[in-house]
Amino acid sequence: MEPLTLRLRSSPARSVDLSALTPERLDGMGTAQIGALPLRDGLCVADLFEIGAGDTRHLVIRNGSDRLTHIGAGMRSGTIGVEGDCGAYAGLDLDGGHLNVTGNAGSFAGCGMKAGMIRIGGNAGDFCGGALDGNRQGMRGGIIAIHGHAGDRAGERMRRGLLLIGGNAGAYCGANMLAGTIFVAGKAGTMPGFSLKRGTLLLARMPENLPATFQDSGEHSLLFLTLLEKQLQRDRGSFARFLPLNQKVRRYCGDLAWGGTGEILIFC
Amino acid sequence: MILNGVVIDDTFAEAFGMRATRILITALNLKWAWHAARAVTGFATSVIGCGCEAGIERELSAEETPDGRPGLSVLLFAVSGKELAKQVEQRVGQCVLTAPGSAVFAGLDGEAVNLGRNLRFFGDGYQMSKVIGGKRYWRIPVMDGEFLCEETTGMIKAVGGGNFLVLARGQSEALAACEAAVEAMSKLRGVIMPFPGGVVRSGSKVGSKYKALPASTNDAFCPTLRGAVKSELSPDVGAVLEIVIDGLMEIDVRNAMRAGIDAVCKIGAAGGILRVSAGNYGGKLGQYHIELHDVMLWNR
């Protein structure tokens, strides 16, 4: 069955929260019901989108815009595809399913996500996979795969899961990270792993500068990287951008100001 | 039933319900995987005195293991889930964690049994957890790098104590036949023969004249006691050896018994093999009664 399609008529003047449009929230609704769903400022879905009937478990948003925020927020199953860009909070608190953005995503993508997968074909804004203000933990599970660059503080306070960045990462990547794994295939900005408590920052290249509270533990071949690579190879279509992973890495343990039980691994 | 001059007794092997798990041990090369696997399956011939029965199921190629290194598949059986969990943890902790370059992974899905969940504390706070593909692994720092182990393995209901007895003119004939049987059975998956070389010469009966002993020698099959006890042996039988089989499923045990008895019968009466029988306790103890004739007639 064809997916349900929402073609944006024109980019809205102000940001519009689309958290109401997830497969489980649309389950059982007809096109008319979906079109009547209120969004903001008295607008409803039909005012902004041309709706093409289809399977509500699979949603495609055409003509994406950075004004469309909270796409897939709280989604638990199904798929949402965004053709083009999307705004902030994409995949916020995602708890399952698959969100695929072909263009760029705004800030806070995948913040607090617990499960599922987010694929961003372009760049992601700041705080991707991080935590919203006031939340103690960022991403808690699932996979975020950014094929372009990531903004500052990617994976901040991340608790679990896998954050893949195909391009460069901004400053303070993995800051205050609690656990989980971040891989940066490009170059990481300044102060990666700042206040890292546990978890792994895997970097393909030496960053501009490491925090002084990381200590060199030498070169090692780490077996878990083989498992990680094998997991990515199982879905080569999604993860070819991030392969292969070096098994031989230089390990920096830290942040020693926080016990030193985390690590930054840099490909040899 | 007579196959190639070998009489197959109209009797049954009495097998028991057990709990089993499979673990996969990998290392830098097969040599060191064997060292670890031999150690972890050491002193694991019988639940009567060892806590569990364990054996090496087969070698694994690098393509078959989670970490892309050569390894071995090991099966462990115990009488209860609690005992199995205890044995797995102790044995992996003392025999795999200690082996250079080793890693250990779950080889079965099922009720979770701790594999690395408690072993991680050996890392003294420096252990790291990684959830990869929905499974949790522990990275425990050790002197040659890291010991990688999966957090749990799976436990399933299994069958232990499948068996058959090879009655021959002499010890060497019985042993040659059992070696051939074990070689044939070792090619099958899902089974182990936990005794040394897969063969046991001290088959037991339940109970003893000594109150402290739960089991004692199977006098009915001891050739030197012929005349002194109610013997099962005809005058021409000089030696009896037993092969005990533990399997993940009853069908695995049956298939292994069939392969083993086939190999024994291939040697036949010309090779000094007189009879094949099976050990049972009158059918009162074990929940599985595996009739030798059923096994040999099935799909023939």
Image (tube, rainbow, N blue to C red):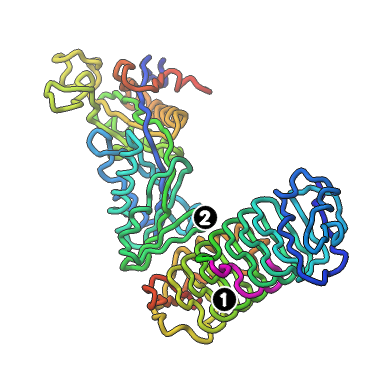
Q: Residue A127 colored magenta?
A: yes
Q: Give, as a three-letter code, the residue at label 2.
A: Glu
**Magenta part of the protein: which range?**
A120-134
| Label 2–label 1 contact, CB within 8 A | no
Q: Position of residue B206 (x, y in %)?
A: 23, 22
Q: Using the numbered discs, state the Cα–Cα distance from disc 2 to disc 1 in whole angstroms.
A: 38 Å
- B130 on left or right of A6: left
Q: Nearer the viewer, residue A168 or B148?
A: A168
- Tell me the quarter of the picture where residue A141 sits: bottom right
Pick the quarter of the image with the N terminus of chain B.
top left
Q: Secondary structure at mark 2?
A: helix
* Residue position for label 2: B63
Number of other residues with Cα within 10 Å of mark 1, as a class: few under 14, some 14 to 19, many 20 or more: many
Residue B299's disc is: none
Number of other residues with Cα within 10 Å of mark 2, as a class: few under 14, some 14 to 19, many 20 or more: few
Q: Given the current orientation, which residue lies at the most extreme left position?
A: B210
The residue located at (79%, 69%) in the rendering is: A65
Q: Residue B15 colored magenta?
A: no
The residue located at (60%, 57%) in the rendering is: A234
Q: Nearer the viewer, residue A145 or B108?
A: A145
Q: Given the current orientation, which residue lies at the most extreme front position?
A: A42
Query: Pointer 2 indicates a residue of which chain?
Result: B
Q: Secondary structure at mark 1?
A: loop
* Residue position for label 1: A153
The residue located at (52%, 71%) in the rendering is: A246
Which numbered disc, 2 or 1, marks the residue closer to the eye? 1
- SS assignment for the magenta stretch, majority: loop
The residue located at (74%, 49%) in the rendering is: A57
